[in-house]
Image (cartoon, coloured by chain):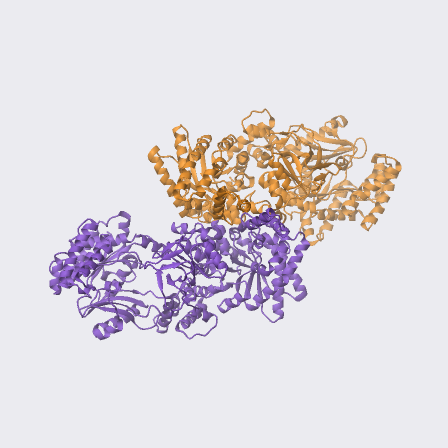
Chain colours: A purple, B orange
Amino acid sequence: MATFVYDFAEGNKDQKDLLGGKGANLAEMTNIGLPVPPGFVISTDACREFMATGRHPDTLAAEVTAHLATLEATMGKRLGASDDPLLVAVRSGAKFSMPGMMETVLNVGLNDASVHGLADSAADPRFAWDSYRRLLQMFGGTVMGVEHDVFADALDELKAGKGVTADTDLDAGDLEGLVATYQKLIVEHAGREFPQDPREQLDLATTAVFESWNTDRARLYRRQERIPDDLGTAVTVIAMVFGNRGAGSGTGVAFTRDPSTGAQGIYGDYLENAQGEDVVAGIRNTLPLADLERIDKTSYDELLRIMELLENHYDDMCDIEFTIERGKLWMLQTRVGKRTPEAAFRIARHMLAEGIIDDDEALRRVTGAQLAQLMFPRFDAEAERDLLATGMGASPGAAVGKAVFDSATAVAWAERGEDVILVRKETNPDDLHGMVAARGILTSRGGKTSHAAVVARGMGRTCVCGAEALDVDTRAKKFTTREGRTVAEGDVISIDGTTGEVLAGAVPVSPSLVVRHFEGEHDEDPLVTAVADTMARADSVRRLRVRANADTPEDAARARRFGAEGIGLCRTEHMFLGDRRQLVEDLIVAESTEAQGTALAALLPLQRQDFTEILEAMDGYPVTIRLIDPPLHEFLPDLTELSVKVALAEAAGNADEHDRVLLEHVKRLHEQNPMLGLRGVRLGIAIPGLFEMQARAILEAAADRRAAGGDPQPEIMIPLVASVREFEIVRRRIEEVAAEIEAERGAVSHKVGTMIELPRAAVLADRIAKSAEFFSFGTNDLTQMTWGFSRDDVESSFFSTYLENGVFDVSPFESLDTLGVGSLVRIGFEKGRSTRPDLHVGVCGEHGGDPASIHFFDQVGLDYVSCSPYRVPVARLEAGRAALTYR
Amino acid sequence: MATFVYDFAEGNKDQKDLLGGKGANLAEMTNIGLPVPPGFVISTDACREFMATGRHPDTLAAEVTAHLATLEATMGKRLGASDDPLLVAVRSGAKFSMPGMMETVLNVGLNDASVHGLADSAADPRFAWDSYRRLLQMFGGTVMGVEHDVFADALDELKAGKGVTADTDLDAGDLEGLVATYQKLIVEHAGREFPQDPREQLDLATTAVFESWNTDRARLYRRQERIPDDLGTAVTVIAMVFGNRGAGSGTGVAFTRDPSTGAQGIYGDYLENAQGEDVVAGIRNTLPLADLERIDKTSYDELLRIMELLENHYDDMCDIEFTIERGKLWMLQTRVGKRTPEAAFRIARHMLAEGIIDDDEALRRVTGAQLAQLMFPRFDAEAERDLLATGMGASPGAAVGKAVFDSATAVAWAERGEDVILVRKETNPDDLHGMVAARGILTSRGGKTSHAAVVARGMGRTCVCGAEALDVDTRAKKFTTREGRTVAEGDVISIDGTTGEVLAGAVPVSPSLVVRHFEGEHDEDPLVTAVADTMARADSVRRLRVRANADTPEDAARARRFGAEGIGLCRTEHMFLGDRRQLVEDLIVAESTEAQGTALAALLPLQRQDFTEILEAMDGYPVTIRLIDPPLHEFLPDLTELSVKVALAEAAGNADEHDRVLLEHVKRLHEQNPMLGLRGVRLGIAIPGLFEMQARAILEAAADRRAAGGDPQPEIMIPLVASVREFEIVRRRIEEVAAEIEAERGAVSHKVGTMIELPRAAVLADRIAKSAEFFSFGTNDLTQMTWGFSRDDVESSFFSTYLENGVFDVSPFESLDTLGVGSLVRIGFEKGRSTRPDLHVGVCGEHGGDPASIHFFDQVGLDYVSCSPYRVPVARLEAGRAALTYR
């Protein structure tokens, strides 16, 4: 027969799946001899059965009875007995701590009879009635579904009638009256009486915990955090101890290290004569934990001993809840404490120095996502903050700008050079151009998978979403806070994409200390030291090399400072923009091969100069240069815009001949689906001379660099290859160019390889590897082709729907779809290596900088990842962490 | 040591790889005792070594010497001896007969001395000098590279000087003088003397044969016919026999059956006192073969005996060349004869009836491509044809229309209802709209892989390309034939896409008898009988079922008449066009869910009616209906056109509000890459109610049909699925609709399955098959995504370049890319079946009607193919043939 209930003494900290985090840690503390009130746990198995059947397992009641009997025997009291009653707290506790679940119900066991027994045994009627009204309030609200305001209003009314302001000004008689009022209110709002039977109270509270697993907020949170829906929650039933029994009593929370900065030394708050909920409610000001030494040195010393013991036992910073009842210290909860990214880095390094954890564990304790957060500019910690509301931090960063309420204004103002924050109730595909123009996006609705959040993350814009306290009125072009403050179009606001804060005015922004460090500046700062030490360790253990995607000498130099070991993707199309657009236009409109040749010849020296500078910036490291990929019409004006312009000019009788000719070419080159059109290697084959010009520019640049004493390592990469024949046609042309240059200036060392970015290239990689000297997975295009959607078109149109419907957990452009796209990466890698065992293989899609994807690439066995310069440190760190996992 | 030379007696007919077709068949005839002049074959191995090294294999000369000695011993003569010389013919002979290769050199062994020996031994000086001048002419032209006209001009001059017109009017003295002239001309044009050494003649002729393997024309032909470049050719050396030795001599060609109609009975031509080249040159009119009976009954009877023997020996219709020298019959060549599609069908059935071949072999002897040719309308066989020129038949059919010379005119004239033929030197992507508008396309340049040919085949337009005899002048809007005839814009021409003929005027077109037969008309015709018998056999052996792609009741009914066993793809988007476009527009511009609902409700009864009629037409067979696939903006006007219209109207101050609103929606729905956008299952998930309306229409139609006593078998197919979750979301919605209908009208039997048309669906097919009841491979989209190009965009822009460069042998949209796309089909099939062993799997891309692809699908193990109604008979035939291959 299945077991559903466990005494604390029967469990341990590794049983979070079964007992929930809270229950498992209470069991652990019990077993290592810490002072934990006795109790038991109703397991997640029971919750899962409840979710499946809608009722408690048949045998649960008998098990609870048995464990309750043990508890009563231990305590020498009976639950809710009318003389000296045993009271219990009923608490939810899932594997992962989760907002939206039911809160604690304290003082279960009190009723109209046992309240007198408690008053007698404690010799404190006020305490007894206060405990009873707290039970009614919590149980009425959480279990019976009465709005919490109903109780709060009654309490306020009582205090107002008595002319007092603090709860503590109410005496036992007042509270007895309040109990009667609460009981009436419960009947009125819930339609039934508060249950007097203590066991019924316990069972109903258990059901309420089970049901709270599926509140909307809990489900939303789980989806955001990718927590499976079928875990279920446990229920902890623990004997009550009371911090609210006078001067020798109190309650507190503590951390074994500072969870905000990571500084060594205990950290926490204490509140005399109070229960835990009072600390949270902020009714009175808490004291710093250190003050406890003065108040109750015995308990304080005991607490410090326990905290040290716990940190050593858990080998990590712990977060603790405790209560002192008349000089007796009780531990009510512990867990590994949450911490800021800064604290994570500092604590890990300190613990390593203290010998608590080893080098590997110190590396496991920090993540690339934390490092990335440390690299965003932040609002000055010292600056004053005028908080308007807090939403969800959906895309990190610190953005300051004038509030605008529609996309057209965002675009118009941005064009005249102003920073704007686009404020909407929620965004939709029509807002795309406004989102592009804005520094940040703020919405009052929607979560981390909303359109605004998905698109903002995709384009790297700071975003706060779901700031529900704001009433956004797009017609009136303003929003109003809960406090009635109004922000109108043009008013400056600041939004923090990490914390979700919405702030009035322009909050000063500081650059990241960590970025300054990577840039080579020498700040004396504990965080910088911790990050530097961590990166050194990651670099020493990682197998994956890290390169950068960089198209300019500046980006290449920055990437190198950030630790890049080469360039994995240097796109050459950006070099065709700006001043050179005219040359490209000449190439496109050229009517003859000669005219094309002239245009290409004009581009050659410019391209050569680009490559010389990039090779110089990355001297000694490989530089993978991708031949031009996008269709040529991308260098020409938009078809619709130009058509309208020409039509209007013709109607007005002042047609421009250049425009008219250009329009012909735009029409000629127009494609229904440019992503699936004449681009990449197809362009290179269709326009003889184009790739040859680029190859010449690369190899001449390398020859120049060598002549200047450098160590250039160019790798020429052919994009969009689907067949070995395409690759060979282009490779042959490149080798002809190389032979010409060799004849003049000696052989220039170089490699010729290909992108693997089409499904066909992946499944035929064994053939392609016969000819290609290296592979680089272009996971952006590979994702597009494998799923059959283009990022430009769909991220904005249906990704939020897909995230909400659970088709994705995360956009496959953010984090590699390891199941689908990943299986093609694995096939391509394995087939490539089967032909050429020393084939060098990397990845240059944006996934190269995504932590989960990096772990996958390491597991598959790739040689390197390449990502944007700012992601290089993240990739180095995650490559180090991945090496710990898959070795 | 490798052997390079084989006597005829050492080979047989199965050694075409080694001896070439001609050599292998001469060997075969020798060995079955037929009168073949003795000789030997220099093998393709020698040619391959020559191609690799540029010279003859080291041991070849010695081998030739040895075999020549045997030949001389057999004949009792020595090559080129000055008394009674042995003469030989040197002939090329590859595995596949191929235009562009070197022609025969006859009379090798004659020189200034042996010509006298020949004259003496034959007692015929004129014959000797005529033979010598023929050698000089052939050798000088073919081996020594002198233009053939040089010799023709000298001959003409001689005849003019003598005042005669026929070669036969020249006497021995004239010819002796001509020999001297030819020798001088050779020195003049080739820069060296005609070699007097007979062995040198033989060796140079051999080299010339080897070199002719790589002429431009031979290479082009091989690419078109997909013949590997590395086969090489053999060289046949055969003792000369002479048909030109007077009245008892002659030469002829014969077929054992009529190669044009397939009719039984011998068929051929005979020319008295002539050599083979005279027949080809058409100098004198040939006699029907039957006349030989009168001229030389002994030889005639002998020939008939041999022909019967050969047909029985080869089990097929044979094509024969023979010579009679002074009453002695010699066989010079035989091979399985080429034949028209009509002949192929009739001969196969006759031979089956005669017991020469069995049922399987009769089926192997015909192809789907031949059947397809028989299904095109043809120009009346009886009609007069006024031939202007002959090009390449690049895309079959018979097209009649007014010649136009630019695409704009083609479009304009077609719009006013005229049939036009677009005539260009060659086409390029700019001509696309003109090609769409035209009935046929005619070009003067380019082969079967040219832009015109590729695009025309892709869109099913009749096309003749490479009609080099035409001088096309697009500026003057006319073309001129080699004879100086002119066709101007507006003149009617007819083009035959099968034969490549370009004809003046409107040639009457007849419908295909075979199509009339499939349509159920009862023509008494031997061809119809042969096709019907063949189809019956194919149907009885094939494992693959054949369905049709049909969107209308008319197409469904036709497909059924053509033998379809259900519908594999009923597209529903076509049902949203025409009168219903307004309803779809209402749906798209609907501002509220209610308005959307109203628009959908209006579409429901119309859709239901569509499905009722289609289910009725296919009663008793499965009908797979694909829910709407294309993006909604396809139902709205083009963005650029509407933008121009609105801009012009606004400029003129008469803007139309409806247009303006519509433009907003067109902009909202505009996608950069609609193929990769909001379509298929994505649309179904994003627009609640749309798929549900379609599912309701399908299931209600099925319920109606059942109520009417029918046997409807609807299968609902979800397009563009990439993940099991997408499929399940839609399937759940469909099942909800089904449950509602079941509650009202009882359960409606149906299946819900998916297209496999994205690479991701193929690699995750095992997961998708858990939920999907059937798969249908959409190989069009799968090809697009696997290669990363869209048919619309690229077929016109670079496919001809790719065909010319050998990236494809054939467009992957015409014939499945079995290597790349096919490997995903195989993965998807195997994974799907691994989860659901009885999963029903078909294919509904256009490849379902392509012969090579059908063989692949049969091999993989699919259950059925589906193709356009007109391809159904082709698919049935090829499915039958495939069953013979893979069993």
The correct choice, above or below, for B371 with respect to A779 in the image is: above
- Which residue occupies the foreground of this view, B357 or B288? B288
- Which residue occupies the foreground of this view, A301 or A715? A301
| Res B182 → quadrant | top right
| Residue sitting at the far front | B653
| Res A313 → quadrant | bottom left
Image side of residue A10 versus residue A180, left or right: right
Give the tally of numbered discs: 0
Residue B379 placement (x, y as % from top left): 64, 31
User: Which quadrant does the C terminus of chain A fall into?
Assistant: bottom left
Q: Is residue A33 visible?
A: no
Q: Can residue B513 be seen in this view?
A: yes
Residue at 67% from the left image edge and 57% from the top image edge: A598
- Which residue occupies the foreground of this view, A27 or B719? B719
Image side of residue B421 versus residue A499, left or right: right
Image side of residue A709 versus residue B125, left or right: left
Residue A419 placement (x, y as % from top left): 46, 61
Residue A411 placement (x, y as % from top left): 48, 56
Residue A273 placement (x, y as % from top left): 20, 67
